[in-house]
Amino acid sequence: MRVLVVEDHRELADLLAGGLRREGMAVDVAYDGAQALQRTSVNRYEVVVLDRDLPALHGDEVCRTLMAERYPARVLMLTAAATIEDRVDGLSAGADDYLPKPFAFAELVARVRALARRAQPAVPPILVHGELRLDPGRRLATRDGRRLELSPKEFAVLELLLTAQGRVVSAEELLERAWDEAADPFTATVKVTVSRLRRKLGEPPLVETVPHAGYRL
């Protein structure tokens, strides 16, 4: 999944982004509300992790703007304030979930994954294609009972192909959703990753290349 972390404390923002990337997510970072809206205007995210107490443009206003624009991402709001009134205000602004600071990182990851599963169309917790099984929560992929040792990007590409349910997924879509905004769109990154994934999946081949269109299972 692709996630946007919006947090004005840069050290915390970078720490959260690094941790989520280690969980196999593609993560972009915005350090203020205006930057967050600029990111969402050009990128599609499944989840936005949004600090409520942003300076200048408050997190509530960011959330209201996303709701008014019918932006499809789920919003997980973070705040140091933990009163019932604060939670009600944050949820009333359009947030889908609320996590008070300080929090355990494992809980943040679990909430982000839960929100992504609630995206439309809904994604089942275990993805299956024949003898291929993928468990995003446990970061586990198997084929015919054999565990597949996949890199984070290989895992992300396989997850996207499985959730597409036979639809052709273009290289551009894979790059947009499995890599962050620092990825170079003119490299052969997607092609190389798919090639490595094919080798690890083994025989018979599962990933089909559709000429001039993309890839599908």
Image: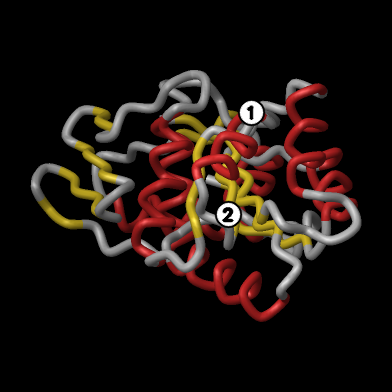
Q: Quadrant of residue 15?
A: bottom right
Instruction: Determine which residue is flagged by label 1.
Output: 92
Residue at position x 44%, y 27% in the image: 118
- Nearest the viewer among 41 and 85 is 85
Residue at position x 26%, y 29% in the image: 129
**Which label lies toward us, 2 or 1?**
1
**Would you call the spot at circle 1 few (<14 residues within 10 Å), some (14-19), or many (20 or more)?**
few
Vertical side of 129 occupied by 142: above or below: below
> Helix, strand or loop at disc 1?
helix
In space, the residues marked 2 and 1 are separated at their CA atoms by: 14 Å
- Nearest the viewer among 46 and 175 is 46
- From the viewer's perspective, tell me whether residue 61 is left or right of residue 208: right
Instruction: Determine which residue is flagged by label 2.
Output: 78
Counting residues from the start of the chain, the first of labels 2 and 1 encountered is 2
Q: Quadrant of residue 87?
A: top right
- From the viewer's perspective, tell me whether residue 180 is left or right of residue 86: right
Instruction: State the image coordinates of residue 54 (x, y, percent, origin top left).
Output: 77, 58
